[in-house]
Image (spheres, rainbow, N blue to C red):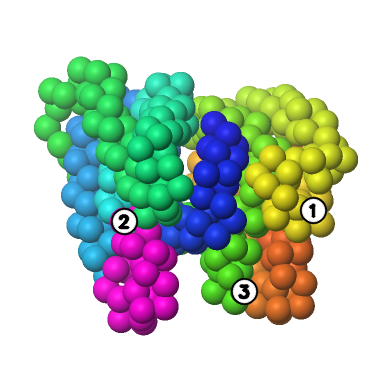
């Protein structure tokens, strides 16, 4: 759905308008991760553990406390971001960019609260129901709203209008997520008196927050720095390239989403051998599915980018580089998730922090030289290094072979 949406928006907005939309949403994705404060990953893990132990009061307390903290943080960040954009003269330099950016900031509290509810459903092992609103319903509604708007505005459709439709789709998804979570919460949670372990939650949430932020920096630094150092058009082309590489990552996300709460429960019960057996099967499956997708994208890179428009074919070399990086990611698909779900997130924080810093440095060096290709090279190389480092840590700390080839 995300791939289809990218093609549609690129065709309707053109490379310039699509670049403005891409740049605004890239900032939003970074700020949403900061506003979430790592509570989504914490909720997935802790809710799975509380359900295993029938600790309903702690589950209710965690959900209530996380909503309050995330709402305050997200609203504050959204207001501050708009203020900063105004103060640096974004409105004077590019009014369309400022309008799209300001509308996109409305997404921060909406998406933050939505993500917490979806995380709770994942923690309760309601994987499909937890992902249905965000992964299926939101893009469907978004495409529908954009199509209706294009029917009335035609060539007058601009990036701020499209961003507004994304806000509307996210708002509807939030309402549905609230309803779904209320339906699937165990009766014990609804009847229990909330209990709080705020110190312990903060102790785990803060590293997870930095992990989430580092992931977005690692995956969005290239787009943000391309937009700042070259142009919004370059950022738009790069997003089309990145969307293709993400097709390889699709099965990685699917497997990790399903495995996360199960790994947390099994580790809490001390069943390391079962964790190893699950990883043996899942990592081989991921690589088996990802390999033909990567080969196809590399062989057909020119024709793939033509789907977005002839101007997007400038990203052929970048697509090939990102595909190679995503193949390594597929071979080490569960390393980050495994560390986070077994309460070893501090190691992911160390490797992720190092990778994020290196990513920013390499982008700063390579983008002025090679542009879009340089951004891809920076992102792919740091992705490979970080995944290999985490695989080594898992082998040493947990005694688990976490790669598809058993290293």
Q: Nearer the viewer, residue 92 or 223?
A: 92
Label 1: element kind: helix
Specify which label sits upstream in the sequence, 2 or 3: 2
Image coords of residue 183 (percent x, y): 24, 18
Q: Nearer the viewer, residue 388 or 79?
A: 79
Label 3 crowd (10 A; few <14 / some 14-19 / many >=20): some
Q: Is residue 350 depicted above or below 202 in this figure?
A: below
Label 1 crowd (10 A; few <14 / some 14-19 / many >=20): many
Task: Using residue 45 as the reference point, say whether residue 174 is left or right of it.
Answer: left
* Residue at mark 2: 103
* Residue at mark 1: 316
**Image point 42% across, 39% down: which residue?**
150
**Image point 71% across, 78% down: which residue?**
368
Q: Is residue 298 depicted above or below 185 in this figure?
A: below
Label 2: element kind: helix
Image coords of residue 260 (percent x, y): 52, 34
**Image point 58% across, 34% down: which residue?**
4
* Residue lying farthest to the right in this orientation: 299
Specify which label sits upstream in the sequence, 2 or 1: 2
* Bounds of the magenta segment: 81-104
- Rendering quarter of residue 41: top left
Task: Using residue 110 as the reference point, say whether residue 156 is left or right of it.
Answer: right
Specify which label sits upstream in the sequence, 3 or 1: 3
Q: Is residue 203 visible?
A: no
The Cα atoms of the two marked residues, 3 and 1, are separated by 18 Å
- As drawn, the label of residue 230 is 3
The Cα atoms of the two marked residues, 2 and 3, are separated by 23 Å
Q: Nearer the viewer, residue 89 or 354?
A: 89
């Amino acid at each position: 759905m995300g791939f289809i949406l990218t093609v549609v928006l690129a065709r309707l907005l053109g490379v310039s308008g699509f670049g403005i939309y891409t740049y605004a949403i890239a900032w939003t994705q970074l700020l949403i991760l900061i506003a979430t404060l790592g509570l989504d990953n914490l909720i997935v893990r802790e809710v799975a553990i509380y359900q295993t132990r029938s600790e309903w009061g702690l589950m209710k307390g965690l959900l209530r406390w996380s909503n309050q903290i995330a709402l305050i943080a997200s609203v504050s960040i959204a207001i501050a971001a708009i203020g900063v954009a105004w103060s640096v003269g974004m409105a004077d330099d590019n009014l369309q960019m400022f309008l799209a950016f300001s509308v996109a900031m409305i997404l921060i509290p909406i998406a933050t609260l939505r993500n917490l509810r979806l995380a709770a459903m994942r923690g309760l092992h309601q994987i499909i129901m937890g992902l249905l609103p965000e992964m299926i319903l939101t893009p469907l509604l978004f495409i529908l709203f954009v199509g209706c708007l294009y029917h009335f505005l035609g060539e007058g459709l601009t990036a701020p209008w499209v961003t507004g439709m994304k806000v509307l789709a996210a708002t509807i998804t939030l309402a549905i997520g609230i309803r779904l979570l209320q339906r699937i919460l165990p009766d014990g949670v609804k009847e229990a008196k909330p209990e709080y372990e705020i110190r312990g939650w903060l102790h785990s949430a803060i590293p997870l927050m930095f992990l989430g932020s580092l992931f977005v920096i690692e995956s969005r630094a290239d787009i943000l720095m391309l937009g700042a150092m070259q142009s919004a058009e370059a950022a738009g082309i790069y997003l089309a390239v990145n969307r293709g590489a993400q097709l390889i990552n699709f099965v990685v996300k699917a497997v990790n989403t399903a495995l996360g709460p199960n790994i947390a429960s099994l580790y809490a019960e001390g069943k390391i051998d079962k964790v190893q057996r699950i990883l043996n099967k899942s990592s081989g499956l991921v690589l088996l599915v990802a390999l033909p997708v990567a080969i196809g994208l590399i062989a057909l890179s020119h024709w793939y980018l033509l789907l977005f428009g002839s101007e997007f074919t400038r990203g052929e070399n970048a697509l090939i580089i990102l595909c190679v990086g995503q193949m390594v990611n597929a071979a080490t698909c569960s390393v980050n998730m495994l560390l986070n779900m077994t309460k070893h997130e501090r190691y992911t924080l160390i490797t992720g922090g190092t990778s994020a810093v290196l990513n920013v440095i390499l982008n700063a060096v390579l983008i002025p030289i090679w542009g879009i290709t340089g951004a891809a090279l920076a992102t792919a190389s740091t992705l490979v290094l970080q995944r290999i480092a985490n695989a080594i840590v898992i082998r040493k700390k947990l005694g688990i072979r976490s790669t598809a080839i058993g290293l």
